[in-house]
Amino acid sequence: MLLELRGITKRFGALVANDHIDLVVQPGEIHSLLGENGAGKSTLMNVLYGLYDADEGEILLDGVVQNFSGPGDAMAAGIGMVHQHFMLVPVFTVAENVMLGHEQTRGGGRLDLEAARAQVKEISARFGFHVDPDAVVEDLPVGVQQRVEIIKALSRNADVLVFDEPTAVLTPQETDELMAIMRQLRDEGSAIVFITHKLREVREVADRITVIRHGKVVGEALPTASDAELASLMVGRSVELRVHKGSPQLRDNGLKVANLVVTNEVGTVVVDDISFEVRGGEVLVVAGVQGNGQTELTEALLGLEHNVSGSITLDGEELVGRSVRRILDEGVGFVPEDRTLDGLIGEFTIAENLMLDRSDGPPFVKAGALQLPFRDRFAKEKVAEFDVRTQGITTQVGRLSGGNQQKVVLARELSRDLRLFVAAQPTRGVDVGSIEFIHKRIVATRDAGVPVLVVSTELDEAVALADRIMVMYRGTVVGIVPADTPRDVLGLMMAGISPEDAKGEVA
Amino acid sequence: MSADHKTTQLDAPLSETTRTVTLVTWKTVGVLLVVTVLYALLLIAVPHSGDTRFLLSQRSDFFQIPVIVVPAAPFAWACGAVMLAVTAVAVVLTARGRRTPLWLVVIYSLAGLAGFLAWAGAGSPRDLSIVGLLGGAVLWSVPFVYGALGGVIGERSGVVNIAIEAQLLGAAFTAAIVSSITNSAFAGLFAAVFAGALVALVLGLFAITYHVNQVIVGVVLNVLVVGLTSFLYSQVLVPSAETLNSTTRFASIPIPVLSDIPVLGPVLFDQPLPIYLMFIAVPTVWYTLNRTRWGLRLRAVGEHPKAADTVGIDVVRTRYNAVLVAGAVAGLGGAFYTTVYLSQFGENMTGGAGYIALAAVIFGKWDPIRSAFAGLLFGFASNLQNVLSVVGSPVPSQFMLMVPYVVTLLAVAGLVGRSRPPAASGEPYIKG
Ligand SMILES: Nc1ncnc2c1ncn2[C@@H]1O[C@H](COP(=O)(O)OP(=O)(O)OP(=O)(O)O)[C@@H](O)[C@H]1O
Ligand SMILES: [Mg+2]
């Protein structure tokens, strides 16, 4: 189906999120949308999907003007969408989520769960996913949730498919699989819109590229363009795609983890007796496929896990058994894996979110009273320093674009006196310009002598940031290796093969 | 080795580690211990002597079971010993890292209840009727159960139904008038359903369409309906009580054979229609919520309305549907007061039953079946003091009123695990 957007304009108050955008997506084409955080990509797609009403402009399918009053109409017209922020009901099973909205029933109005299960299995098999139709979504790691979201979109046989940053939480292998799926769908004649911040993916899979900046189309590019060209078209300046960092100046202080065991609430041992050390002045990247205990490891460091044994010491002080408050007071900065769930309060303003973990004393609170002028000054400074794209510090965080939300979390956590910095997926969903910035800040934190622990499923990021890389598999540590270890070896380690064997196999 | 190896390995389910352990909490043990100690203290502080007479069958019954006479004090202490034994077993199990099975807790509860009854009825010349105890519990629980079902349906769709009280009372009032005028209990029941739905419609209008805080709307509705029915009662019903406020009630329908079963027969199978309807309503609501399209969409809207919206579900309409059905079901509970229990309407005759139903919703973790059992428990509690006052127990009735709730609270704290309301409960859905 041929999709045309003509002169789409969408305003949020004074902010023009989409400014007369024209876009044509041919059937049998993968059309990539590139743009900074907050450029207006998701807004445009939400207009297409009927979630927002456009202020101006029209949507045409095969030349016919459409009038969507809601997503139901868009879906009926053959448009499917994988949303940037998952649209899954957490307490439902995979099958229930997939069937929701187009349920089949049997006699007595009974839901045909069997049919839904079969459909999940069929799509999983067709595209090489491994998703259990009866798993409850909230128990699944984010990567798997993303696949559920994709299955949901595919189950409706849409002719126009929108993928809004589907790869932000996928591993490289999963991303490759997804790109194969997109090619397959394209070859079957679907029109596909693909939004991502990862230039490698764009070049690999896109047939055409449209770049959006500040709500306007600023140009088109061909997939043959270089990373640097694409990046500068997006950001409007040249971007350093490499992290520059000197050799680590190790200090004596640091984080020591010994025999750490974390058990989740149903009794599964998710972190299984691991020991390692991060010295002040170095970055240890925890690599591995999502769901192998990395999340629980970081949460245990912050005191968020309940069933923990073993020891975690920071500069010699034991952290296990302490409350989160007291661990934060020790100077632990923490960027959680899921910013919308754990990192921010969407209804609060940027200024409020920036002081969220510092509400128990000066300088933000004196004699029990919020110091509003100080808070606002602080917020303005941080918004400028971290380049958060927003109308002002009183904007609700939930209204920011994904990447800008991430910057708010980082701004908060990096603005304290730190003795340890823990970041899970710090650049998830962040544009290339901001990645450059965040990486620089992380390296600066390390150079200030702070031990830094970064969890990343992105191999590029792991290799770029790390002084050493620790690979986790099924709750255990496969090995800790230098950052210049070949990627093939790292890949095998992520499948649970010890570094020695992996080296042997690659050689 | 080739790259193939790598992908096949990585394709395997990712989130599993190999080891698992069983986690236990000492919460259950703690509650058992506390209750046992309280029980013993009660027996020591207020010793009762004499016999207690447990009556298991009614005079009219086909099968006659002789009255069981037990010496109160020794029996109560024996029950206490059983409770202590169960507690000890629970301690041992927990220390070994195992869970306390439910049947042990059930034995414990029955022993505690039997001992308590023996203690309370000690020395009375009258019989303590078990049928009266259980049958009354079922009867008293009717408004709680229907109210709780209404609460569950509303809240699972994301609308907190604080207005259960208003729905019960409005329905009782309407049923009284309609049943009196038409001389038909059925007409009264139908009218009650409409009255409940009407109150729900007002709730929906403010809560769903105008995004007014749902708790506030609910409370206001409760106060409003109390005032309105009291006013109409004194102005309209009292002057012409004969025509407008003397209802035709549902008669008991004994089910052949089943109603002859000792004890359970009269309790379950010799009841008026609205109670049989209740037995059917509970599983029906469960089935509808969990197994039908309507229920799936209703729950989706209550958990994550935006997600529901993105798959083309009309959130507003689904919520209106749910709230109206919830009001209608609660209305059935209201009909109980004037078409089953009494044959006239009395000022504020529901007396806070709606709030108890609300508590049952939460104790039942927003599940229709559990909530119904919670309602039954509250019905039992309400009935207990009636039965004991008939027996002429020396225990002050205020104390009797309190005990079951204390025990319930402890039971919920110790035995009911983490409970979580529907995620979007109370949240209006605003698009965009
Ligand atoms: N509901 C809303 N209310 C007000 N402003 C909004 C709303 N949704 C988005 N915006 C604003 O519109 C702009 C475009 O946001 P959008 O989410 O489309 O960006 P994006 O290109 O998808 O960015 P990212 O790559 O970070 O996801 C941002 O400045 C954002 O703050
Ligand atoms: Mg976006």
Image (cartoon, rainbow, N blue to C red):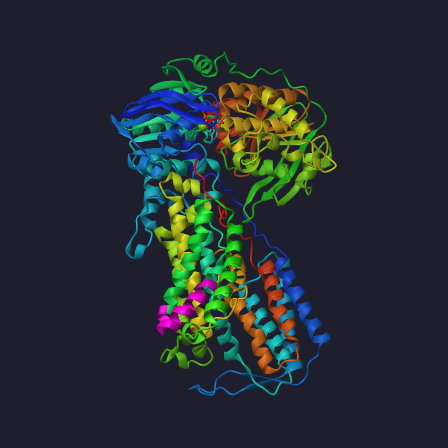
**Highlighted range, magenta:** B169-187
B256 to the left or right of A465: left
Magenta-colored stretch includes residue B179: yes
Q: Main secondary structure of the magenta part?
A: helix
**Closer to us: B61 or B251:** B251
**Closer to us: A501 or B34:** B34
A142 vs B138: above or below: above
x then y, percent, for residue A162: 36, 30
Question: In the orientation shown, which residue stands out farthest toward the left?
Answer: A63
Q: Number of marks in the image?
A: 0
Magenta-colored stretch includes residue B272: no
Q: Is residue B307 visible?
A: yes
- The residue depicted at 54 percent of the width and 20 percent of the height is A464
**Closer to us: A486 or A97:** A97
B384 vs A275: above or below: below
Q: Is residue B1 visible?
A: no
- The residue depicted at 40 percent of the width and 39 percent of the height is A148
x then y, percent, for residue A215: 43, 21
Q: Quadrant of residue A419?
A: top right
**Closer to us: B357 or B74:** B357
A321 vs A197: above or below: below
